[in-house]
């Protein structure tokens, strides 16, 4: 049992009890392969298709447009590589438009494609963490094969103008990939409103088990698979389906849809109260991206004269679990690529921590965090050579 106060839901959210209860029978008693034609296989297939409908309903898609994957990283890679595969095979000129603040699942895929001759344009955000839809649309070329823009940034929580961008590029007929991993389950996400052709989501960000995700593929869009060896997922993702994970993702999607309306204002109030109180108590503290629209649960704090990793460790010892940014970048010595793209100096980027709230977060926990953080910052500043310089 995890102890302490968990404020790192953007890294991974705990599995909800209702989700665990829905998954358990498919781990212990009902273990048929969804590709088998006997009764156990038919029961498994029915469970997969029921979950597919639940996920589709959460984002306003058709069930046939949902492909189950192992998570957000695979979904992003399937979208990027599946879209560019034909150009690579035929050795045709190809170009991608994306942003400098994407998750590494998109950034590193694009960088690998650059090594293979694909041109990539990286749109940088303003100081508020938000890109210009007009600038992204203006970057289109005749050979552009994909535009990839995240909906909510995984570090700052800032929302990007995806619907505005889709309207600007629609006439060009270029597919739009939206990484919505940090948005689905936190704000209403409807693929028709966004105008996207591809949308990635991940189960463990919305209280489903780790190791399961999905990719929305607009009906009629052709995508080459990453894997070969089976006809699962309408030949778009080979391999035996992760039945327990799929059932868990479906149940988590159903629960998220039912609670969005009440959870959004509750989390936003907790987040805003935290930022306001800490700004009054800690000189040199800035809530990054606070001037832009954000998901309601995320606060990214830049604190002058403090190393983010040292503060995360000190908070952990005090019983509070936060992060310095993207969980998959833990251990990286370089400052956040997101914050550098927003124009923060490296020393300020290194002094940042991310607090991300969730279903179980209470006002009492936030009050405790507000009491705990200022003395830790004061102590670390006194111990650090950086304390000799001004904020």
Image (cartoon, grey):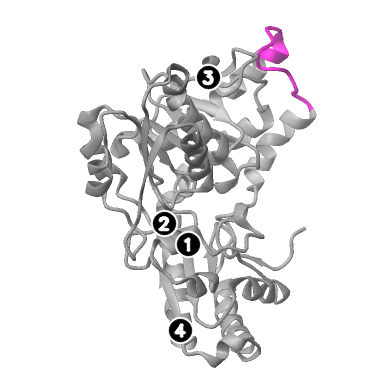
Residue bounds of the magenta highlight: 29-41
**Residues under labels 4 and 2: Cα distance?**
24 Å
Which residue is nearer to you in this view: 273 or 112?
112
Identify the residue position indicated by label 3 in the image.
Answer: 236
Q: In this view, which residue lies farthest toward the top?
A: 37
| Above-or-below relation of 338 to 75 | below
Identify the residue position indicated by label 2 in the image.
Answer: 295
Q: Mark 1: give few (<14), some (14-19) or many (20+) Cα within 10 Å.
A: many
| Above-or-below relation of 144 to 350 | above
| Above-or-below relation of 176 to 92 | below
For the question of whether residue 263 can be seen, the reply is: yes
Identify the residue position indicated by label 4 in the image.
Answer: 284
Marks 3 and 4 in Cβ contact (< 8 Å)? no
Q: Quadrant of residue 203?
A: top right
Q: Earlier in the sequence, mark 3 or mark 2?
A: 3
Identify the residue position indicated by label 1 in the image.
Answer: 298
Q: Mark 4: give few (<14), some (14-19) or many (20+) Cα within 10 Å.
A: some
Q: Mark 3: give few (<14), some (14-19) or many (20+) Cα within 10 Å.
A: many
């Amino acid at each position: 049992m995890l102890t302490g106060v968990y404020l790192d839901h953007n890294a991974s959210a705990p599995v909800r009890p209702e989700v665990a209860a829905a998954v358990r029978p498919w781990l212990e008693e009902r273990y048929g392969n969804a590709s088998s034609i006997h009764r156990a296989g038919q029961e498994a297939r029915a469970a997969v298709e029921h979950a597919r409908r639940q996920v589709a309903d959460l984002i306003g898609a058709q069930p046939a447009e949902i492909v189950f994957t192992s998570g957000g990283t695979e979904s992003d890679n399937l979208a990027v590589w599946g879209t560019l595969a034909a150009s690579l095979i035929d050795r045709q000129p190809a170009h991608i438009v994306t942003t400098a603040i994407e998750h590494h699942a998109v950034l590193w895929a694009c960088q690998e494609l650059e090594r293979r001759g694909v041109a990539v344009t990286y749109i940088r955000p303003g100081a508020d963490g938000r890109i210009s839809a007009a600038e992204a649309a203006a970057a289109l070329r005749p050979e552009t094969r994909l535009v990839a823009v995240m909906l909510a940034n995984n570090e700052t929580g800032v929302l990007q103008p995806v619907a505005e961008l889709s309207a600007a590029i629609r006439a060009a007929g270029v597919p739009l990939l939206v990484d919505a991993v940090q948005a689905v389950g936190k704000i209403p996400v409807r693929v028709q409103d966004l105008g996207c052709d591809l949308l990635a989501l991940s189960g463990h960000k919305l209280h489903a088990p780790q190791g399961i995700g999905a990719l929305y593929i607009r009906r009629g869009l052709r995508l080459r698979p990453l894997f070969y060896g089976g006809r699962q997922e309408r030949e778009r993702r080979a391999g035996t389906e992760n039945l327990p994970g799929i059932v868990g993702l479906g149940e988590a999607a159903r629960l998220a849809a039912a609670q969005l309306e009440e959870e959004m204002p509750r989390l936003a109030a907790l987040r805003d109260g935290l930022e306001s109180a800490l700004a009054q108590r800690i000189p040199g503290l800035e809530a990054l991206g606070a001037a832009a629209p954000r998901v309601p649960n995320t606060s990214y704090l830049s604190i002058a004269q403090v190393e983010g990793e040292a503060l995360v460790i000190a908070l952990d010892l005090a019983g509070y679990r936060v992060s310095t940014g993207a969980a998959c970048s833990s251990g990286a010595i370089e400052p956040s690529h997101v914050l550098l793209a927003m124009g923060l100096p490296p020393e300020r980027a290194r002094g940042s921590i991310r607090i991300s709230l969730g279903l179980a977060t209470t006002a009492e926990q936030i009050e405790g965090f507000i009491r705990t953080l200022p003395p830790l910052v004061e102590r670390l500043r006194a111990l650090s050579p950086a304390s000799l310089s001004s904020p």
